[in-house]
Amino acid sequence: MTALAYLRRSKESDARTVSLDVQRAAVAAYCRTAEIEVVGEIEDDGVSGGKRARFGRINAGIQAAGARAVVAYHLDRLARDTAGVLDWMEDLTRRGIAVHVCGRGEVEATSAAGRLTVGVEALVADHYRRVIAEKTRDALARLRAQGRRTSRFPPYGARLAQDGMLAPDPSEQATVARIGALRAAGLSVRRIARQLVREGVPARSGRPWQPTVVARLIRRGIS
């Protein structure tokens, strides 16, 4: 049997998460034992388990590799969306594509017992994903309320002070004011970007200003 290996690490992952390399090694070991030939691989790093668009990429990978199975480290690596994973697995079954999980074997979702098992696993995984998202959202809200940074990079118009707090960046604040003035004058984001380039105003990245960056600043209400 030929198979497509699927590896995923979510965007909430930390040092305790099973790495992509560990997943890859486990899939390879499982396939050797089960006499399955890996003919393709899809790797998603920093991708949420709730993103259904991933199923389309896996389906395309199956077709491109001519695989007859998908092998993953764990069922929750494939998805944490209950309805999505059940529908997708049923579709694979109709097409004669098997789903294998390391240390467990083939997983099916067509029989009553199989659908119940997969459904319960997916429901638990989906619940865990939502709990993590809620905790993350609450933690970020507390940091913002305290004026602390919520990412590796401070927002445009601010810099990171020695005490870890955000402080205004005079140069970027001047650019923020200029963007606000140009917007108030009726300029589109594209024209604002061009005007900043003409005026020699540096972007944080060092590259010319892009309309998407200007639009993001305006959308966030910074300018």
Image (cartoon, grey):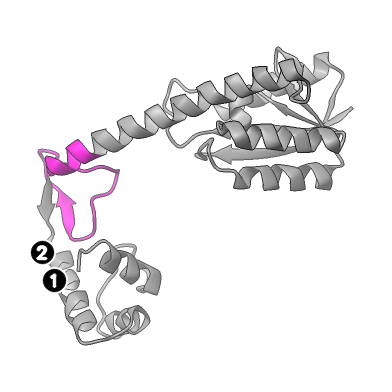
Q: Can residue 174 be seen in this view?
A: yes
Residue annotated with mark 2: 170
Question: Relative to 160, is 151 on the left or the right?
Answer: right
- Residue contact at pointers 2 and 1, CB within 8 angstroms: yes
**Looking at the picture, does residue 136 appear above or below residue 220?**
above
Q: Which of 53 and 84 is in front in this view?
A: 84
Q: Nearer the viewer, residue 59 or 13?
A: 59
The amino acid type, in three-letter code, at marker 2 is Pro
**Looking at the picture, does residue 85 appear above or below residue 106?**
below
The amino acid type, in three-letter code, at marker 1 is Ala
Q: Which residue lies at the image location 18% right of the left edge and 65% below the top edge?
A: 172
Quick one: label 1, few (<14), some, or many (20+) residues within 10 Å?
A: few
Residue annotated with mark 1: 174
Which residue range is magenta in the image? Answer: 141-165
Q: Is residue 18 visible?
A: no
Dot 2: what SS? helix
Dot 1: what SS? helix
Magenta stretch holds residue 146: yes
